[in-house]
Image: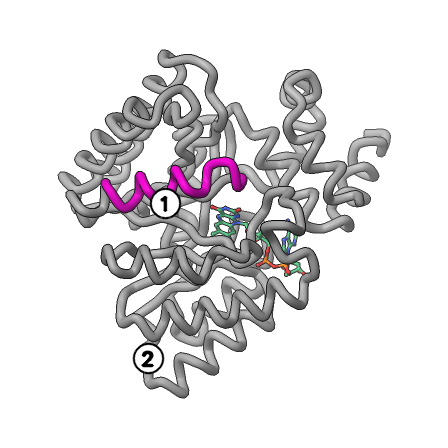
Amino acid sequence: MLRAFLLKLSESKLLAAWVTSNARTRRMAHRFVAGETLEEAVEAARACNDARMLVSLDYLGENVATVADAQRARDAYLEVFDRIARERIDANVSCKLTQLGLDLSVEFCEGLVNSVVERAAAHNNFLRIDMEGSLSTQRTIDLAKRVRSQRTAVGTVIQAYLYRSEGDVKDLLVYGCRIRLCKGAYKESSEIAYARKKDVDANYVRLMQLLLASGMYHGIATHDPRMIAETIRFAAAKRIAKNQFEFQMLYGIRTDLQRMLIRDGYRVRIYIPYGKDWFPYFMRRLAERPANVIFFLRQFFRRS
Ligand SMILES: Cc1cc2nc3c(=O)[nH]c(=O)nc-3n(C[C@H](O)[C@H](O)[C@H](O)COP(=O)(O)OP(=O)(O)OC[C@H]3O[C@@H](n4cnc5c(N)ncnc54)[C@H](O)[C@@H]3O)c2cc1C
């Protein structure tokens, strides 16, 4: 119930305005968000690279309401790719389609995505299209397939909590699409998504096996030690080399596991979000783990 409540709150523009302008909550968000500027994101990326970790930079934003906002997001992504190349950081980029105008017009959004993927390709880099709530799933998959059939520098994300995901994985593999597998972070009804953790986990393992066995390079995104252990076990049993896939984790979460995997010779990519529009992302991280809420409430009410 707390998870559902926090995910509902994550959609509140009023709360977002208050939380993101409050100095104390802004400081607290730093646990999960590298900062509000590209400068800070680059610094965090460099620290990850120094620790032998790869990076995916995400310029935060979603559900834009105007063409101008979507174009601004496109420009920000073009700048990120140029900056990554200039700074020689080992990083790719993640974006959300509703930030690039998906809800305004699919054609318009696709135009912006194409220009970003073109820039990614020019730098020999890669754009990952994040997966959002289920209202966007089909449009995201269709758009990813269309863009992927023109250029290889794009991939997308599959959520293990959706019943439909096995079909989507098989469909995307036909297009040679590189996939990030995650459990799923949005509020979905039991008509379309597994509600129990044990069912989500079982599907995650099934999909992970499909991906690894495909012979393509995919991202296994999780902080769950059981999912990680299953992946390591499956890869070893099938003689899939450690450099034929990567683990992915979020900035600020389970840094112990991140270091352990690097030490054991696995590839680890850290998803580094930055930007002023961090509220929905921050709320999803709170929703994932009730202990985070208690921790942040304590921090908030503690007298300095
Ligand atoms: C790189 C990356 C990209 C992602 N991209 C997307 C996407 O495009 N679309 C989407 O819907 N979701 C995305 N997610 C989020 C994902 O769907 C899950 O909501 C999130 O990763 C938590 O699931 P888990 O696999 O870590 O397992 P869980 O079973 O939720 O957690 C396992 C353990 O991980 C730790 N943990 C997990 N979350 C937190 C947290 N917030 N704070 C502290 N500890 C935590 C805890 O120790 C927990 O016991 C992404 C996740 C990652 C790692």
User: For the residue marked with disc 2, what is the amino acid?
Assistant: Ile
Q: Residue at x 27, y 26 (%)?
A: 112
Give the quadrant of the N terminus: top right
Seen in the picture, residue 156 relative to 266 is either above or below; the reply is above
Question: How far across and how far down the image is residue 18, in percent?
Answer: 69, 17
Q: Residue at x 19, y 49 (%)?
A: 152
Residue at mark 2: C-beta within 8 A of ligand 1: no
**Quadrant in which residue 97 is drawn:** top left
- Whether residue 57 is visible to the viewer of this picture, yes or no, is no
Question: How far across and how far down the image is residue 274, in percent?
Answer: 47, 33
Q: Earlier in the sequence, mark 2 or mark 1?
A: 1
Question: In what element is the residue under mark 2?
Answer: loop
Give the quadrant of the C terminus: top right
Question: How far across and how far down the image is residue 34, in percent?
Answer: 51, 37
Instruction: Find the residue positioned furthest to the bottom.
Output: 237
Residue denoted by label 1: 141
Taken as a whole, is the magenta stretch helix, strand or loop?
A: helix
Horizontal side of 37 relative to 15 (left or right) equals left
User: For the residue marked with disc 1, what is the amino acid?
Assistant: Ile
Seen in the picture, residue 12 relative to 284 is either above or below; the reply is above
Image: magenta residue range:
133-146
Q: Nearer the viewer, residue 86 or 197?
A: 197
Residue denoted by label 2: 240
